[in-house]
Amino acid sequence: MSEWHRLYKLRSFASEEDRNRLRATLIDRQIWFSSPVDFNDPFDCLFSVSMSGIDESVFRDWTAEQAKAHVEQWFFNDNCKDVCVYSLSARNDDNLM
């Protein structure tokens, strides 16, 4: 197992809110956990539901693909409001962060 020595929090300074969160982290020892609902990348925190092995008669008037989309949207809307994320990177130049 590789050993790491540092973790980086890559943060924007673009807005006053960004600067206030950085100030709170450095001075007040507070960190901000983001909601996936507020992420700017629509693929962050998405998951995929498998409908294989399910009898399609349980979907009523939906196709398996429509049921899959409905379940994924329901899960995101009802559960992501209770989830918070704090992203760190082992690299200080990670473009995805």
Image: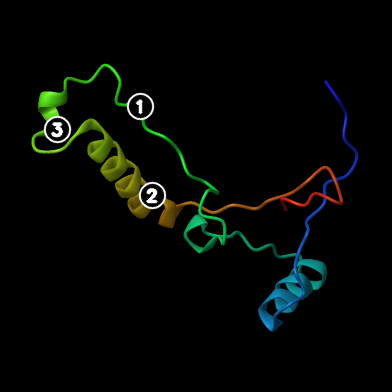
Kind of residue indicated by mark 3 = Phe
Residue under the image location 26 percent in, 44 percent down: 70
**39 w.r.t. 55: above or below:** below
Residue for badge 1:
50
* Coordinates of residue 68 in the picture (x, y in percent): 29, 36
Q: Which residue extends farthest bottom?
A: 16
**Real-space Cα distance between discs 1 and 3?**
14 Å
Q: Is 36 on the left-hand or right-hand side of 13? A: left
Residue annotated with mark 2: 76
Residue 25, quarter of the rendered image: bottom right
Q: Residue furthest right?
A: 5
> What amino acid is found at the position of numbered circle 2 in the picture?
Phe
Question: x, y (%) of residue 45?
Answer: 52, 46
**Mark 1 and mark 2: span between their CA atoms?**
15 Å
Classify residue 2 by image quadrant.
top right
Q: Amino acid at mark 1?
A: Ser
Secondary structure type for disc 1: loop
Q: Position of residue 24 (x, y in %)?
A: 74, 72
2 left or right of 12 in image: right
Which residue is tagged 3?
A: 59
* Nearest the eye: 18 or 72: 72
N-terminal of the pair, mark 1 or mark 2, is: 1
Residue 14 is labelled as none
Q: Is residue 69 above or below residue 20?
A: above
Q: Name the residue at 88% across, 29% down.
A: 3
